[in-house]
Image (spheres, rainbow, N blue to C red):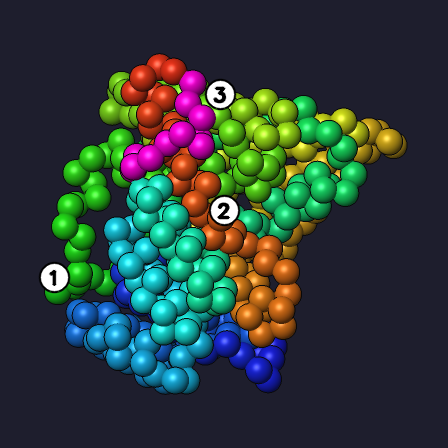
Amino acid sequence: MSKKEERRLRVGVLGCGPIAQAAHFESCTKARNADLYAICDVADELRERMVAIHAPQRSYADYAAMLADPELEAVIVATSDAFHVPASILALQAGKHVLSEKPLGVTVEETRALQEAVAKSGQVLQVGHMKRFDAGLQAAKSFIDSEMGSLLALKAWYCDSTHRYTMTDALQPLMLHSAARRRPAQDPKSDMRRYLMLAHGCHLVDTARYLAGDIVAVQARLSERCAARCWFVDTEFANGALGHLDLTVAVRMDWHEGFQLYGEHGSVIAKTYNPWYYRSSDVEIFHEKDATTRRPLGADGHFYRRQVEGFADVILHAAPMTGANVRDGVESVRAMVAIARSAESGRRVRLADVQGGV
């Protein structure tokens, strides 16, 4: 664990569900520049068990009470997707900075409303696209920005595995649940096509945007067979590059995620692992100038801890934001909605034209 800095961001986590248990509580306690100051959840028994394990300074059953605490500086919104935007807006209005789990929201309109709330508040909002803190992807991004020149094309894939729960059960802590937990009005898994796009498609879209820039239009095809769903998406980037995205859930093989990128002065190929292995992507960067390939080790693969540290650095030290900002979150939702509309219609869809949700 990194040595703790003297000045640390006091963070409250909203929600004691699986993502908080598997990632956010530990990240705040391990971060060099943040502390797990508070935990908030309406489910008393679950919250009390999390408090016993992680020992925050404060515990709240009521979100408004946590936001009223003058010592609290920032909130991690670790709730169901439907609650991300309203919980984030309340925190901003209370003068707190926000790290919201991905996706930023479930409709274009609500994410735009949150974008306006961020602008009015003057607070920092970062979206929990933690793959931007994968050291392998960061090395690829550095090469793209500094040496690669013009981008020709990007192919990226995110293929969940039929064996993923066997893998994750061996890696994650035992998940605790409560019948008293707050649920959204609609079960997110009642529409699996929508659920999979929001849960997994947002990772693929954000990785593509992180590496290749803004997406302006998509043309998508969807195949649903063999108890699986496969989206193939032809992607147009604002810089003129071509893209192909493959979102498949679930493949009959190991976790399969990565990308290939072709540029003017080199190329990149990457293999990304199941995130709960906390292993940085294997990235090969080919430099045309001397015909050499370089592979960064990326020894620190705790993306969630590194994400909290990056968030805290922006707030405490005015560091540049290297994570996803609110605009990135909005554009990710736009892209997912465009993919859904294109798959339904069979037509090319411009992101600027979409409304509604997936």
Q: Magenta segment, which residues?
A: 348-358
Quarter of the figure with the N terminus: bottom right
Point out the tag, 1 or 2, that comes first from the N-terminus. 1
Q: Distance between the residues labelled 1 and 2?
A: 34 Å
The residue at the point 51 percent across, 29 percent down is 216
Q: Which residue lies furthest to the left in this view?
A: 179
> Picture coordinates of residue 133 (x, y %)?
56, 53
Within-10-Å neighbours for mark 1: few <14, some 14–19, many 20+: few
The residue at the point 63 percent across, 72 percent down is 317
> Residue 320 got which mark?
none
357 inside magenta stretch: yes
The residue at the point 17 percent across, 73 percent down is 45
Q: Mark 1 points at which residue?
A: 179
The residue at the point 34 percent across, 62 percent down is 89
Quarter of the figure with the C terminus: top left
Q: Name the residue under label 2.
A: 328
> Picture coordinates of residue 218 (x, y %)?
46, 24
Q: How far apart are marks 3 and 2 (CA)?
A: 20 Å
Whether residue 173 is visible = no
Which three-letter amino acid code belongs to the residue tagged 3? Asp
Viewer-nearest of discs 3 and 2: 2
Viewer-nearest of discs 1 and 3: 3
Q: Is the residue 320 above or below the residue 155 in the image? A: below
Label 1's element?
Answer: loop
Left or right for 227, reference 185: right
Point out the tag, 1 or 3, that comes first from the N-terminus. 1
Left or right for 301, reference 295: left
Which three-letter amino acid code belongs to the residue tagged 1? Ala
Q: Name the residue under label 3.
A: 234
Label 2's element?
Answer: helix
